Image (cartoon, rainbow, N blue to C red):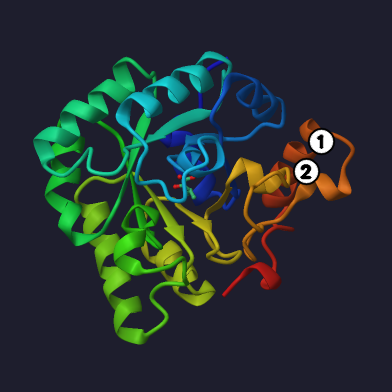
């Protein structure tokens, strides 16, 4: 079976079919997500928190990301696999190319994700100019948590919202082909999604984005910390982990998740 590509996702945006994204860190869950028809598996550096037990994503290394990406790719067939570039692995454009190439060659990822706005424009240009597909990430940036001082909703004020929209446009112009928007007001996420040509995937960004992503461990209710308000434990209404993942996928596809109660 052929894997989804960026064209598959672009077509879903254009035809208004919500894109289902789920984080994934190993082969068995990749297999279950495949059965549920998840469109994109994100090997998120959230693995530093949910798998490794760290307080933040900052300690995650490139070797960790390669290891988990290989395992996810091995048991997935159709989903596009995106690997997060860990903290400080893309501090310069040259470093970013070297490390993204490793995630693609040794890890088997089809796209890499980077957290940040205008400051990353030259890096995104450097990557995409060399054939490396990029997913940008704006809003709450977990790798900057020590600078932010906490996990809070971002860009609530009008000036910050305007800046975020501008940065999203700059990243798209630099060649980014996908954007993750984390923890921003619903109205802003809706505006970014209809302004950009590329698909926008929300987490804590309300129902009006082109797709949704959740952390797998929240979907099956085994996160160490309390489940964030924008997430949902789908295992509560189902009888197995496989059914919970399938319930998440169909809830996103049928626009039953997220609802107003998950939005800001
Ligand atoms: O690392 C991760 O899981 C992520 C998602 C929260 C989008 O970046």
> Which residue in the protein does label 2 denote?
247
Mark 2, Cα crowd under 10 Å, few <14 / some 14-19 / many 20+, is some
Is residue 30 or residue 218 the one in the foreground?
Answer: 218
How many badges with numbers are in the image? 2
Q: Which residue is drawn at 66% across and 58% down?
A: 226
What label sits on residue 93 in the rendered view? none
Q: Position of residue 211 (x, y in %)?
A: 55, 51
> Which residue in the protein does label 1 denote?
243
Q: Position of residue 237 (x, y in %)?
A: 87, 49
Mark 1 vs 2: CB contact within 8 A:
yes
Q: Which residue is drawn at 33% across and 24% down?
A: 63
Task: Name which quarter of the figure residue 238 lies in.
Answer: top right
In the displayed structure image, the side of residue 244 where residue 180 appears, left or right:
left
Q: Position of residue 154 (x, y in %)?
A: 41, 72
User: Which of the image's four quarters has the C terminus?
Assistant: bottom right
Q: Which residue is drawn at 53% across and 35% down?
A: 40
Task: Please indicate, yes or no, whether residue 131 appears anywhere in the rendered image.
Answer: no
| SS for dot 2 | helix
**Dot 1 beta carbon under 8 Å from ligand 1:** no
User: Which of the image's four quarters has the N terminus?
Assistant: top right
Mark 1, Cα crowd under 10 Å, few <14 / some 14-19 / many 20+, is some
Q: Position of residue 191 (x, y in %)?
A: 43, 71
Q: Residue at x 47, y 71 (%)?
A: 152
In the displayed structure image, the side of residue 121 where residue 203 appears, left or right:
right
Furthest residue in direction front, as rendered: 54
Task: Name which quarter of the figure residue 31 lies in.
Answer: top right
């Amino acid at each position: 079976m052929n894997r989804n590509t960026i064209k598959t996702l672009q077509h879903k945006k254009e035809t208004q079919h919500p894109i289902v994204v789920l984080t994934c860190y190993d082969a068995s869950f990749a297999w279950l997500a495949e059965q549920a028809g998840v469109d994109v598996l994100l090997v998120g550096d959230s693995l530093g928190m949910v798998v490794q037990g760290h307080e933040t994503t900052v300690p995650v290394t490139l070797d960790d990301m390669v290891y988990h990406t290989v395992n996810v790719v091995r048991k997935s067939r159709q989903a596009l696999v995106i690997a997060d570039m860990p903290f400080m692995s893309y501090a310069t454009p040259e470093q970013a190319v070297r490390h993204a190439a490793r995630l693609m060659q040794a890890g088997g990822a089809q796209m890499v994700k980077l957290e940040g706005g205008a400051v990353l424009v030259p890096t995104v240009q450097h990557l995409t100019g060399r054939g490396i597909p990029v997913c940008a990430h704006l809003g709450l940036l977990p790798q900057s948590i020590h600078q932010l001082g906490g996990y809070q909703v971002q860009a609530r004020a009008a000036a910050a919202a305007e800046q975020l929209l501008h940065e999203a446009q700059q990243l798209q112009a630099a060649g980014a082909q996908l954007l993750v928007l984390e923890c921003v007001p619903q109205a802003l996420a809706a505006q970014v999604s209809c302004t950009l040509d590329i698909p926008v995937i929300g987490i804590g960004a309300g129902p009006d984005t082109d797709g949704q992503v959740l952390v797998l461990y929240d979907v099956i209710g085994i996160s160490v910390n309390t489940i964030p308000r924008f997430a949902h434990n789908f295992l509560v209404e189902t009888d197995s982990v496989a059914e919970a993942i399938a319930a998440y996928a169909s809830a996103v596809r049928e626009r039953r998740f997220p609802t107003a109660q998950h939005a800001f």
